[in-house]
Image: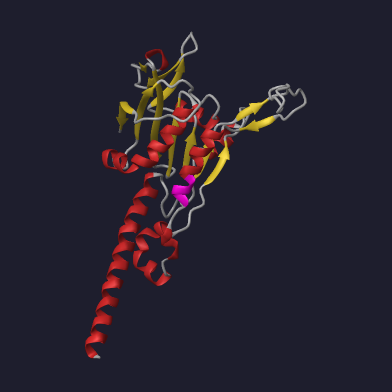
Amino acid sequence: VLANVATTIGFAILGTVVYLLAIVTAQTRRGRFLLFFGVNDDHRDISIYVSRLEIRPGGTTGVEGRELKDGYTGPAITRIEYDAALALKRRLDSNWLVHVPRSIRALFRSSKHAFSSLDAQVDVGPPADFPGEEIRHLLARNLVLIGSGVYNLLSARYQESENSFFAFREDQTGLWSVALLIPGAEQTIEGRSKGLELAIIQRVKYPDVGNTIILCAGNGAGATHASALYLLENYVMLQRRYGYRDFGICLAWRKPECPNEKLAGKPQIVCERSR
C-alpha cells in the first residue's frame, strides 16, 4: 500500500513539474511573440488595418454582368487581404495560457500580458479625407498594416515617414518597384520589369510613444497576402536576426500570371535593413 501511495505521489509531482515546465515554455514563447508585435503590459492592444477600396456609382456589376448605376457605393475590401488579416488575428488571439489558474499566473508577475486574452481588431483603413490629427492618433497605437499606400491610407502615411525603410514607386510606364529609402541616395529595387513580384515587411518601434507598427505590403494583393503569411511563419527567424530593433526586408517571388491571387513558392530576400 505504501509503495502504491509513493508511486502515486511521485507521478503527481512529476506531472506538476511537467505542467509547470510547459507553462514556463509557453509563457516565454507567447511573451516573445507578443513583444515582436509591440504588445506588452503597458500596450496590450493591437489593430490590423486592411486596404480600403472606395466603390463609386457605376463601379459594380450584378450577377447578370449588368453595370449598376445605382448600386452599392462606399468602402470595400479585398478577400485575399482579409484572409491575411484573419490569419494574423487568429495567431495573435490564440492563447491557452488564459486558462492557467490565477494562483499559478501570480508566479509570473513580470509577464502578465502573456497570460492575458487578446482580441486583435481587424478594420478597414480610413478614407482619403480622414483628418490628419486622427491619422496621427491611429499611428500612435500598435498596428499591423496590410496593403501598400495605394489603397491603405495608414500605410501611405507610414511609408512617408522618416522611419520607413522602403516605399513603393510607380514609373512612367505604370510599373511598380520598391524604393530603398536611404537619405540622399534612394535606390530602386526593380519588380515586374524584371519578372519579379515584390513585397515588403517592416517593423518600426516608437519609444517615445511605446507603440510598434508592422507593415506587410506587396505589388499586388497576392504578394501582400504572402508577405503576411511569411511574417507569421518566420517571425522567430526575424526575431533572432534583428532582436527588437527596427527592420525592413524586401521579398521577391517569380512574377505570377495573376498578381491578385495567392502566391506559391518560397520568396527570396533581396534586400534587408535594420537599425
Judge from the rendering whether residue 149 lies leftward or rightward of residue 207; answer left or right: right
Q: Is residue 204 visible?
A: no
Q: What stretch is highlighted in magenta?
A: 89-93
Q: Is the magenta stretch mostly helix, strand or loop?
A: helix
* Residue 63 in which image quadrant: top right
* Residue 55 in which image quadrant: top right
In percent of width and height, residue 118 lies at 48, 53
Q: Residue at x 37, y 45 (%)?
A: 36
* Residue 233 in which image quadrant: top left
Q: Residue at x 57, y 40 (%)?
A: 123
Q: Residue at x 55, y 31 (%)?
A: 51
State yes or no: residue 91 in magenta: yes
In percent of width and height, residue 151 lies at 55, 27
Does residue 70 sit above or below 11 in this rendering? above
In percent of width and height, residue 247 lies at 34, 34
Foreground: 252 or 127? 252
